[in-house]
């Protein structure tokens, strides 16, 4: 670095300089079970058809009417209730950032259960909102008393509820969530129901919104096509009462969704049965994996409503980290969440893969547990 570059760093925010960049694990040649991606690729026929569609896109033009087509297609896909609007983000990550930005007034706060999705806290802090994490119970249930106390004390602008949660993969009790939503509505705060894992979940809060629109008039529902099967294209969407959507949409960079993303998403929605079938296979594989892991001595799997699963290891505090390394030597990449939060001590997070990938995962785990039994 030249001295001049070094000097210029003083104009970069100190809190940004103190941050670590989001680490993406090296994964070439690995069975990639670390990032909740859909393991299935498109058939050669669909790939060819998509290629033709993308080839014909006018990449010389800024995104235009096709973006509206995509919004219309998504509204149809979710059967958007009357009075609600829909906006698009470059992934849900962008929607989370825009929402933080929209709420960033002095003393504004964000509350979310922990362990949870790291972007809630990160985007809040970067936009100058105070972030308050509320620990879950040991079984990963919502701690209603603690959540309610934090909401009463801080009156947060935004409460995030991931439904199901990442990384714990469970759905929280609907009655508890209803009561928290009511509490937040009393002072006019926003509640985000983040349904990134909706394709794999037995429940959606959208049904609740349909049945009780008034009680959910301050609820924003986020979804993404990432876990659905299009993590590469970066497309998230948010559903909320039109008046709220209109405000947040003002902050959206005008061309945030590329023409290629939009065309690919439209193509996927036209073939939504292909992705629905993939989700069905993944859910069946999830149950098979859960049963197999329950039979293994030395680990405890947690029931999942998503395309991932938390697995806790018996033994000393480093058992999960040792197993993570053994899995890597078997070319299986998962996420070591054991240092992420005290409630996740000795835990790994596994993405559900194809039947063959899951077999490789189980074999690698057997090997890791065999080593553990000899230490
Ligand atoms: C993956 C994930 C997202 C972000 O999804 P993108 O659309 O890929 O940005 C949002 N929320 C939760 C809980 C997630 O796990």
Image (cartoon, rainbow, N blue to C red):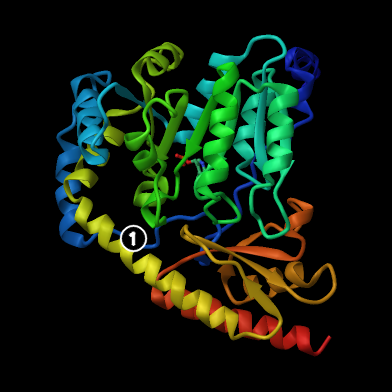
Q: Nearer the viewer, residue 170 or 325?
A: 170
Up-down relation of residue 257 to residue 26 (above or below): above
| Image side of residue 292 versus residue 23, left or right | left
Residue 206 in which image quadrant: top left
How packed mark 1 is, by other alpha carbons closer than 10 Å (few <14, some 14-19, many 20 or more), is many
Up-down relation of residue 360 to residue 73 (above or below): below
Q: Can you give x and y, in whole percent of width and height, for residue 6 in the image? A: 79, 20
Residue at image location 73% in from the left, 69% down from the top:
320
Up-down relation of residue 355 to residue 366 (above or below): above
Residue at image location 19% in from the left, 20% down from the top:
65
Up-down relation of residue 260 to residue 256 (above or below): below
Element type where label 1 sits in the image: helix
Q: Can you give x and y, in whole percent of width and height, for residue 207 in the image? A: 34, 42
Q: Nearer the viewer, residue 120 or 57?
A: 120
Residue at image location 37% in from the left, 15% down from the top:
254
| Image side of residue 62 versus residue 33, left or right | left
Count of picture labels: 1
Camera sees residue 258: yes
Q: Nearer the viewer, residue 371 or 179?
A: 179
On-image quarter of the N terminus: top right
On-image quarter of the C terminus: bottom right
Camera sees residue 1: no
Please name the residue that numbered disc 1 is placed on: 279
Q: Can you give x and y, in whole percent of width and height, for residue 280 in the image? A: 32, 65
| Image side of residue 367 versus residue 39, left or right | right
Note whether ligand 1 is within 8 Å of mark 1. no
């Amino acid at each position: 670095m030249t001295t001049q570059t070094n000097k210029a760093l003083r104009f970069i925010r100190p809190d940004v300089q103190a941050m670590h960049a989001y680490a993406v694990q090296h994964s070439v040649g690995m069975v990639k079970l670390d990032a909740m991606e859909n393991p299935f690729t498109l058939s050669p026929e669909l790939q060819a058809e998509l290629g033709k569609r993308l080839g014909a896109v006018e990449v010389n033009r800024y995104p235009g009417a096709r973006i509206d087509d995509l919004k219309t297609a998504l509204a149809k896909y979710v059967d958007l209730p009357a009075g609600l609007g829909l906006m698009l983000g470059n992934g849900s990550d962008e929607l989370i950032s825009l929402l933080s930005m929209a709420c960033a007034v002095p003393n504004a706060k964000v509350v979310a259960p922990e362990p949870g999705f790291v972007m809630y806290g990160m985007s809040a802090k970067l936009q100058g909102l105070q972030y308050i994490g509320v620990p879950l119970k040991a079984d990963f249930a919502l701690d209603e008393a603690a959540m309610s106390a934090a909401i009463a004390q801080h009156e947060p602008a935004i409460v995030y509820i991931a439904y199901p949660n990442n990384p714990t993969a469970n759905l929280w009790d609907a009655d508890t969530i209803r009561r928290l939503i009511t509490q937040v509505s009393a002072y006019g705060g926003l509640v985000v129901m983040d349904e990134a894992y909706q394709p794999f979940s037995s429940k959606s809060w959208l049904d609740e919104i349909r049945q009780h629109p008034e009680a959910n008039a301050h609820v924003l529902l986020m979804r993404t096509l990432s876990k659905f099967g299009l993590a590469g294209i970066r497309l998230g969407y948010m559903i909320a009462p039109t008046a709220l959507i209109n405000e947040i949409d003002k902050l959206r960079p005008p061309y945030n969704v590329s023409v290629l993303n939009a065309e690919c998403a439209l193509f996927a929605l036209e073939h939504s049965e292909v992705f629905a079938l993939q989700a069905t296979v993944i859910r069946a594989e999830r149950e098979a994996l859960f049963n197999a892991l329950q039979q293994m001595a030395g680990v405890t799997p947690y029931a999942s409503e998503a395309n991932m699963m938390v697995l806790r290891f018996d033994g000393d505090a480093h058992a999960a980290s040792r197993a993570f390394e053994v899995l890597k030597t078997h070319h299986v990449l998962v996420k070591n969440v054991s240092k992420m939060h005290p409630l996740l001590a000795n835990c790994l997070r596994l993405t559900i893969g194809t039947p063959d990938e899951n077999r490789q995962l189980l074999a690698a785990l057997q090997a890791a547990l065999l080593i553990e039994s000899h230490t």
